[in-house]
């Protein structure tokens, strides 16, 4: 049961935030497992950006993990960690985009798909989660009749 000091407006927002963060955690954990434990390494085209990609892996996954835990603890720091993770994920995707953009035959199509997929799968959900942020009323009188759970 959610208590009065909840961080998101409704139960759908909690569910959506949990699923979003969990899916990205699985994605980054799977790739880290493949690269670091199984020894697959990065593709040869990414060798120039090896250190930034590894650094971003080691920054994004722990931030997503802390965000996931903060959702259940109902800590307001969840938004801070989520937004930092978003910023780092955009940098990560920009590096991947830059490398693949140089090798593509139709750059306009690839640019459109990159922007569309980032808006749909990364930026859009984070903006939606931030939109569902619960801002409590300043006094109890303003809150009468509005608290429905």
Image (tube, grey):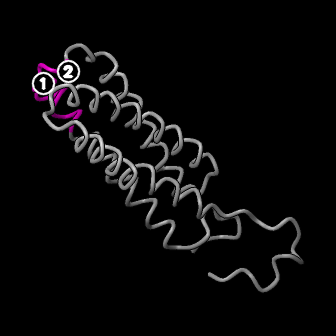
Residue 101 sits above or below residue 138 on the image:
above
Q: Which quarter of the figure has residue 98?
A: top left
Q: Which quarter of the figure has residue 130?
A: bottom right
Tell me the crowding category of disc 2: few under 14, some 14 to 19, or many 20 or more residues within 10 angstroms, Cα based.
some
What is the spatial separation of the Cα atoms under label 1 and label 2, in whole angstroms?
A: 6 Å
Residue 40 in the magenta stretch? The answer is yes
Q: Which residue is mark 1?
A: 43
Q: Nearer the viewer, residue 10 or 70?
A: 10
Dominant secondary structure, magenta: helix
The part of the chain drawn in magenta is 31-46
In the rendered image, which quarter contains the C terminus?
bottom right
Label number found at residue 95: none
Marker count (numbered): 2
Asked whether the beta carbons under mark 1 and mark 2 sit within 8 Å of each other, the answer is yes
Where's residue 99, x and y in %?
23, 25
Label number found at residue 46: 2
| Residue sitting at x 44%, y 65% | 16
| Left or right side of 142 for 93 | left
Q: Which quarter of the figure has residue 62?
A: top left
| Residue sitting at x 43%, y 43% | 64
Where's residue 102, x and y in %?
20, 25
Q: Nearer the viewer, residue 123 or 10?
A: 123
Residue 13 in the magenta stretch? The answer is no
Give the SS element for disc 1: loop
| Left or right side of 143 for 41 | left
Give the SS element for disc 2: helix
| Residue sitting at x 81%, y 68% | 137
Where's residue 92, x and y in %?
35, 31
Tell me the crowding category of disc 1: few under 14, some 14 to 19, or many 20 or more residues within 10 angstroms, Cα based.
few
| Residue sitting at x 53%, y 43% | 83
In the rendered image, which quarter contains the N terminus?
bottom right
């Amino acid at each position: 049961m959610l208590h009065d000091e909840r961080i998101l407006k409704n139960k759908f927002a909690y569910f959506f935030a949990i699923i979003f963060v969990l899916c990205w955690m699985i994605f980054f954990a799977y790739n880290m497992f493949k690269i670091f434990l199984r020894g697959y390494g990065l593709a040869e085209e990414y060798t120039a950006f090896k250190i930034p990609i590894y650094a971003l892996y080691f920054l994004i996954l722990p931030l997503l993990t802390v965000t996931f835990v903060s959702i259940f603890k109902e800590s307001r720091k969840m938004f801070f960690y989520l937004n930092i993770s978003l910023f780092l994920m955009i940098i990560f995707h920009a590096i991947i985009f830059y490398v693949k953009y140089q090798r593509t035959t139709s750059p306009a199509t690839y640019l459109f798909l990159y922007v569309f997929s980032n808006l749909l799968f990364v930026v859009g959900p984070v903006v939606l989660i931030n939109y569902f942020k619960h801002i409590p009323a300043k006094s109890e009188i303003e809150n009468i009749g509005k608290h429905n759970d």
